[in-house]
Amino acid sequence: MNILVAGGAGYIGSHICVELLEAGHDVVVIDDFSNSRPEVLDYIKEITGKAVKFYEFNILDEAKTKQVFAENKLDAIIHCAAFKAVGESVVKPIEYYMNNLTTTLIMAKMMRDYEVKSIVFSSSATVYGDPETVPLTEDCKLGETTNPYGTSKAMMERILMDVAHAYPQMSVSLLRYFNPIGAHESGLIGENPKGIPNNLMPYIMKVAIGELPELGVFGNDYDTPDGTGVRDYIHVVDLAKGHVLAIEKYATPGVHICNLGTGKGYSVLDIVNAFELVNNIKIPYVIKDRRPGDIATCYADPTRAKEELDWVAEKTLDDMCRDTWNFAKKHLKDD
Ligand code: UFG
């Protein structure tokens, strides 16, 4: 198939490109490098031996987006072009809603106008809000989102569901990611956020390379086994493989909703300890106040992914820690 990956130079998008190319698909990428780097495209080629067809611009530029759809006969879209920093979204709600919602609307319009049958959307477990019970199944009710980023994800889901309803020939897949971490085992692509990281693993990485002195652990008084927040960390390569399967198995028209998580919860201190043990590096940390908007525990029930996509996360927490460090050594040290 010929598949457009919107945001294909980003952390998750680049891993999706690799898995699609390795599965024999052709890949078209649109990315504006707002949170990614051009060399990622070379790395994708180095890993797979194949190149993506690349366009550099923001999808908000509707005329250029139209041109891509006119030039390429696309079979499916994977939409992972979005702003994603929770804290930044609170101070820049207009930019977040403008970018995330408008690009989704433009994608949907192009699908309709150019008769593209399916879209796989990067959604997030954030749409469940503060869960009443865990593990989270896809039937759990959606919760209050606590920041414009999370709200934009919930709204994008809603937009795509309404589009699927209006155009019943379309397949809309909403993949709800839990906490993607890790990097490709080659160490060539991974997460390399600009500035001070918000998320746990990128922060640990920067402490490990000596760029930041210590990790702040946001609260140790949650109702969890060691008092720190528990999340479902999933290796980004497992996550990317889930997209290839979704393209293949969710081809039937309608809305398909699926969690991508491992079903296991690890605390912040579990992650610190695993990273230290696997990589033999000390990660100094201090306990800080809780971060506003954080929840105690969040992990997936991945049953549906197994049943419908024949997908299970294969990589372990040790793999995630080892691959993260392998990537950091190669890339972050010389930045
Ligand atoms: N944490 C720290 N110190 C840090 C960063 C994080 O202790 O410097 C803790 C958090 O308090 C939380 C855990 O590490 O307990 C994970 O935090 P992340 O910021 O890595 O991830 P979140 O679970 O807060 O959010 C992630 C994604 C969101 C997504 C959400 C879905 O960043 O995009 O999962 O559940 F919406």
Image (tube, helix red, strand yellow):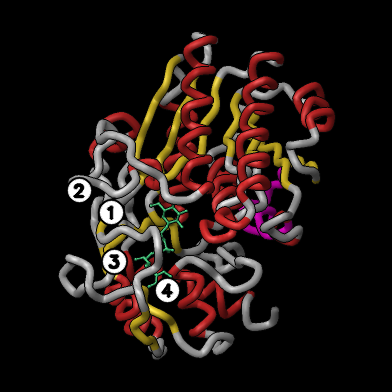
**Residue 143, relative to residue 189: is it above or below?**
above
| Element type where label 4 sits in the image | helix
| Image x and y of residue 188, in percent | 61, 66
Image x and y of residue 272, in percent: 34, 78
Q: CA distance from mark 1 to mark 3?
A: 8 Å
Instruction: Tell me the SS state at disc 1.
Output: strand
Answer with the quarter of the image where residue 21 lies: top right
Residue holding disc 4: 322
Amino acid type shown at disc 4: Arg
**Which residue is located at x 74 percent, y 54 percent?**
33
Contact check, label 2 and label 1, Cβ < 8 Å: yes
Q: Amino acid at mark 3?
A: Gly
Q: Amino acid at mark 2?
A: Val
The earlier-in-sequence mark between 4 and 3 is: 3
Residue 225 picture quarter = bottom left
Residue, disc 1: 298
Q: Which residues are magenta?
A: 42-52
Foreground: 204 or 155?
155
Q: Label 3: which residue?
A: 229
The residue that label 2 is drawn on is 134
Q: Judge depth for marks 4 and 2 and give the one in front.
A: 2
Query: Is 157 positioned to the left or the right of 266 in the image?
Result: right
